[in-house]
Image: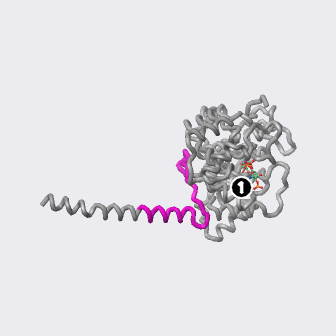
Amino acid sequence: MHAVLAKQAQSTQPDIDSHAMARVIVFYVLTCLFYYGNGVVTPPKLKLNDGRDIPGIALGTWLGNNTKPSSNEVELAVTWAVEAGYRHIDTAYAYKIEDQVGRGLKKKMADGVAREDLFITTKLWNDHHAREEVVPALRESLGKLMLDYVDLYLIHWPCGQFDNQTYDYTDYLETWRGMIDAKNLGLAKSIGLSNFNQEMMDRIAANGLEKPAVLQVELNLNLQQPELLAYCREHNIVVMGYTPFGSIFYSKAKEDAPPPRVDDPELVAIAKKYGKTVPQVVLRYLVELGIIPIPKSLTKSRIEQNIDIFDFKLTEEEKSLLKTFDKKYRTIPQHKWLDHPYYPFEKKQ
Ligand code: NDP
C-alpha cells in the first residue's frame, strides 16, 4: 500500500511542481505589470520612529537661489511625479513654490489619488524660530499647499534670522518645542530637522524632548557622511538626502568640486551594465546606504528616470568604488551663516 502511494506521489510530484512554478510565474508577471505597467513605479517605504511609513524617494522642488519661480513649472513637475509613482514631495516655505505644489497635488487628488497615499514634507523658515511662531508659520504653508496637514514638518536650518537679515539667536530647543506643538495639534503628522548636526540632536535628547523622526542633510557622492548616518541608524532617525547629484553635472559643478562627473568612465560602465544612466546609479547607491534621496527635476523624462531605480542592486565592489568619491565636499555649504552660533557644519571651508 505504502509503495503504491509512494509511487502515486512520485508520479504526481512533477505536476505539483509545475503548477507551483506556473503560479510563481503568473505572480511575478502580475507583480511586474503592477509595478512597471505604464511606467509607474511603486517605491519601497521606510518606518519612522513614530510608527508612520515614509516613501523611499521624494521629488525635490527647490529652484535654486537665483531662479525666480514662474507660474506653473513646479505644478507640472508634481503632477508628472505623481503619475510616475512618486508619493513623496519635498518642499519648503523658503522655495516660494508651495502654492504650485498645492495645485499639482490638488489636480492629482481630483484624479483619484488619495491624500493618505501622499507624503508631503515642508520646512519652517529661519524667520519664524520663536516657539509661538511655529504653528502660524505652518498654517501659512498649509494654506499655500491647500492641505489640512503635512506628513512631515522640518526645521529648515538651526540658524534663526529675521526678515531684515539680522540674526535671531532663539535657541533651536524653543523652535523644536514649537514643532512638537504643531504635531500635537495634528497639523504635522511627523516632525524632524534639516541641517542639524549630531551634537544638536544629542542636546535635544539630553533635554528630554521628543526625538526627531527625520534628519534631512546634503548627501551625494562627494559628501557621504558615514558617521552621521551611523548615528542616525543607531538612534532610529530616517535620513533624507538633499542635492543627491552633488556636482556630477558640469552645469552645477564649481571649479573646486572633486570628481566624478556624469561622464566618468567607471560610472558609465556600471550604468551600462544595468541598462541605467549614471544619475540612476548615483540615486541607487544612496538608496542602498539607507537614505531617502530627493532628486529635483522639472523635466518629465528625468522625473520618470529618477524613480526607476528599484529593480537593480549594486555589487559590493561597485559600492566600494562609489565610496572612494567621498571627499567631505559640500556642494551647498551656506557660508553666509558661518558666524551664527548655531551654524551646524565644519567651519574650515
Ligand atoms: P539635485 O541634486 O536634485 O540636482 C538637480 C539638478 O539636476 C537640476 O538641474 C535637474 O535638472 C538635474 N537633473 C535631475 N535629474 C537629472 C537626470 N536624471 N539627468 C540629468 N540631470 C538631472 O539638487 P537640489 O539641490 O535641487 O536638491 C534636491 C532637493 O533637495 C531640492 O530640490 C530640495 O527639495 C531639497 N534640498 C533641501 C535643502 C535643505 O536645506 N533641506 C537644500 C537643498 C536642497 P532639471 O530640473 O532641468 O531636469
In this view, the residue in front, 43 or 171, is 43
In this view, the residue in front, 230 or 215, is 230
Residue matched to label 1: 139
Asked if 234 appears above or below 307 in the picture, the reply is above
Q: Specify whether 7 is left or right of 231.
A: left
Range shown magenta: 24-53
Q: Specify whether 161 is left or right of 303.
A: right
Whether the residue carrying mark 1 lies under 8 Å from ligand 1 is answered with no
Q: Is residue 181 visible?
A: no
Asked if 264 appears above or below 149 in the picture, the reply is above
Q: Specify whether 174 is left or right of 210.
A: right
The secondary structure type at the circle numbered 1 is: helix
- Report x, y in % for residue 100: 76, 61
- Report x, y in % for residue 123: 71, 49
In this view, the residue in front, 50 or 10, is 10
Residue, far left: 1
Is residue 44 inside the magenta stretch? Answer: yes
- Report x, y in % for residue 295: 69, 51
Asked if 333 appears above or below 41 in the picture, the reply is above
Q: Measuring 56% from the left and 43% from the top, which residue is drawn there?
A: 315
Q: How many marks?
A: 1
- Report x, y in % for residue 7: 20, 60
Amino acid at the residue labelled 1:
Arg
Q: Measuring 59% from the left and 65% from the top, which residue is drawn there?
A: 114
In this view, the residue in front, 284 or 111, is 284
For the C terminus, the image quarter is top right
Q: Is residue 58 visible?
A: yes
